[in-house]
């Protein structure tokens, strides 16, 4: 099993959600976050005074999927969230040791 | 023309406006009792419109402060309005309109509470040339309260509640009525030929001067100016600020229109109509000027500046909303909008922290509007306008400064650093405006 963590532009959430559902993802966790990477924030002006916006709003998606599905999910996120401009986000992939479905006690890939 | 010296006002209309001259002939045909009733209605309607400006100020300020200080800002607005009502009744009204009862002729009016007419006044006992005392008092009271409202926005987010309210008492009982008597009570500025129709100077710049003195003595909010840079403290609720601005805009029709002080003739209603149109045009032009300028200078329109721009247009047209054409009123308003766009960062460069832009809007544009009278009204003299701006300015700024200074060194006017950072809602009131419940 793999845990896929993707940070994407907030306006891409709906498109990514739909594409992942079509690609076979059965669930995901979504969090509104702020942060920066290569984009490293930008400046805004309020009443004539310039100020730095260091932390840019992003959406973090987390999915746990079976190993076989991981490549599809990653490429789907990459293709859907991409605008080609700075700030498109990143995808991280981690190994997952175990998963348990609380209702039934199923474990491993069956619990996803 | 917000003055008891109405004859000079009528003379002005007769000499400058052919339409109004015709109207004066017609007015002779209106029974004086009817004219008395109509003017009273004008004051009552104008009065409740200006009353609503208190709501406008409260919403504007609640929207422009940070969310941790919203309850306090609303509390101050309720407090200052209530106190203005009490002290304008106890002292202000007769100090401002002493009639023949000046303590010092043309300089200092009389100290006495307001007394209304008898219940069920008969026409024989009424001064049919004007309006009821009750309606006049009600209308003028609202102007006094508006002056106090101007101050609260500038000193927001760091001033203690009670010292602020004590200042409001001094402002509404003494400072405002005394200087207003010089013009609208028929005092020495009126006799010098000073023209201020509805109060660009008498109301708005007075509020602005008092706010400037307060902001200077109080100092900037913690963290506002750091390492030579201005750190923005972003508004908490722009829908409220926008609602407040539109409410003020609405109230201004009563503010300027009611200041015609007469509705008993064709000439008067024609003039009131002109005033409504010009007031509206100036506000619209001020908003658009600010929108275009912020787009050009900062590459994005700044809504808070657009709101200030509309109010700047309104303040600018207030000294003379009658004589300009719609085009001239629009230009006067647009210049007001521009003054605000440059005035806000100008104050920041001087490290004068004015939370809602009250000083650029009410002081800078109040001065501009008072000067602008000379462009459309042949009766006005630039020298007299400038002289009056300075007299009122020095009086208000010095006296306000003394009061703020005394308050600072007796009870203290500023909350502690911890209270300011945590927010006045929690620390001074224990009540938050936007309570998040799990």
Image (tube, helix red, strand yellow):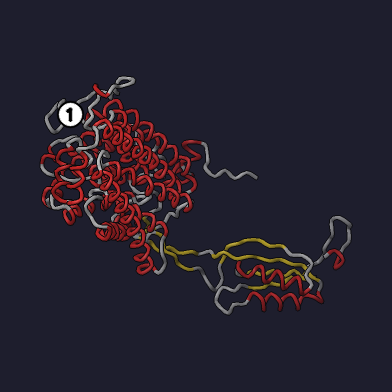
Q: Residue B34: x, y in percent? A: 28, 33
Figure quadrant of the N terminus of chain B: top left
- Residue at 21% across, 45% down: B23
Q: Which residue is mark 1?
A: B99
Q: Is residue B164 above or below residue B114?
A: below
Q: Nearer the viewer, residue B157 or B226?
A: B157
Q: Residue B71: x, y in percent? A: 48, 40
Res B408 visible: no
Q: Is residue A103 above or below residue B109?
A: below
Figure quadrant of the C terminus of chain B: top right
Bin the neighbour count of mark 1 within 10 Å (Cα to Cα): few under 14, some 14-19, many 20 and up.
some
Looking at the rendering, which quadrant does residue A60 occupy?
bottom right
Most extreme residue toward the front is B29
Q: Is residue B194 above or below residue B120?
A: below
Q: Residue B95: x, y in percent? A: 22, 29
Looking at the rendered structure, the number of numbered marks drawn on it comes to 1
Q: Residue B392: x, y in percent? A: 19, 42
Q: Secondary structure at mark 1?
A: loop
Task: Chain letter for mark 1, please.
Answer: B
Res B29 visible: yes
- Residue at 79% across, 70% down: A65
- Residue at 16% across, 30% down: B108
């Amino acid at each position: 099993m793999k845990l896929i963590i993707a940070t994407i532009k907030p306006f891409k959430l709906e498109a990514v959600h739909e594409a992942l559902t079509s690609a076979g993802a059965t669930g995901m966790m979504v969090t509104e976050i702020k942060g920066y990477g290569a984009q490293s924030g930008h400046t805004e002006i309020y009443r004539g005074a310039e100020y730095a916006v260091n932390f840019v709003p992003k959406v973090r998606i987390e999915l746990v999927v079976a190993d076989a599905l991981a490549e599809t999910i990653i490429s789907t996120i990459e293709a859907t969230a991409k605008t080609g401009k700075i700030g498109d986000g990143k995808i991280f992939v981690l190994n997952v040791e175990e998963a348990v479905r609380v209702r039934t006690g199923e474990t491993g890939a069956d619990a996803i | 023309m917000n003055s008891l010296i109405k004859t000079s006002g009528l003379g002005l209309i007769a000499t400058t406006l052919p339409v109004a001259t015709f109207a004066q002939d017609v007015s002779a045909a209106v029974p004086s009792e009817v004219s008395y009733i109509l003017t009273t209605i004008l004051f009552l309607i104008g009065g409740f419109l200006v009353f609503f400006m208190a709501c406008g100020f409260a919403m504007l300020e609640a929207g422009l402060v940070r969310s941790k200080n919203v309850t306090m800002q609303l509390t101050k607005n309720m407090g200052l309005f209530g106190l203005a009502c009490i002290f304008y009744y106890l002292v202000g009204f007769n100090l401002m309109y002493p009639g023949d009862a000046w303590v010092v002729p043309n300089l200092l009016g009389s100290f006495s509470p307001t007394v209304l007419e008898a219940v069920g006044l008969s026409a024989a006992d009424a001064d049919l040339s004007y309006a009821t005392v009750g309606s006049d008092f009600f209308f003028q009271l609202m102007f006094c309260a508006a002056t106090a409202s101007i101050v609260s926005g500038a000193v927001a987010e760091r001033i203690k509640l009670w010292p602020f309210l004590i200042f409001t008492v001094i402002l509404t009982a003494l400072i405002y009525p005394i200087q207003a008597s010089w013009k609208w009570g028929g005092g020495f500025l009126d006799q010098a030929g000073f023209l201020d129709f509805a109060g660009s100077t008498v109301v708005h710049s007075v509020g602005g001067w008092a706010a400037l003195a307060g902001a200077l003595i109080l100092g900037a909010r913690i963290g506002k100016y750091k390492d030579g840079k201005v750190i923005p403290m972003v508004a908490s609720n722009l829908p409220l600020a926008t609602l407040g601005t539109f409410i003020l805009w609405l109230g201004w029709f009563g503010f300027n229109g009611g200041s015609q002080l007469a509705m008993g003739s064709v000439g008067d209603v024609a003039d009131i109509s002109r005033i409504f149109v010009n007031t509206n045009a100036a506000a619209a032009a001020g908003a658009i000027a600010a929108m275009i300028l912020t787009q050009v200078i900062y590459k994005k329109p700044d809504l808070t500046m657009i709101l200030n721009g509309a109010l700047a247009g309104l303040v600018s047209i207030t000294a003379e909303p009658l004589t300009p054409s719609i085009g001239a009123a629009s230009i006067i308003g647009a210049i007001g909008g521009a003054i605000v766009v440059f005035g806000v960062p100008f104050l920041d460069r001087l490290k004068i922290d004015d939370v809602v832009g009250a000083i650029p809007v009410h002081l800078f544009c109040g001065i501009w509007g008072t000067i602008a009278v000379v462009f459309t009204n042949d009766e006005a003299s630039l020298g007299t306008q400038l002289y009056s701006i300075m007299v009122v300015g020095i009086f208000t700024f010095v006296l306000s400064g003394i009061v703020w200074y005394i308050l600072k060194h007796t009870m203290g006017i500023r909350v502690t650093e911890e209270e300011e950072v945590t927010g006045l809602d929690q620390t001074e009131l224990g009540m938050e405006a936007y309570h998040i419940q799990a």
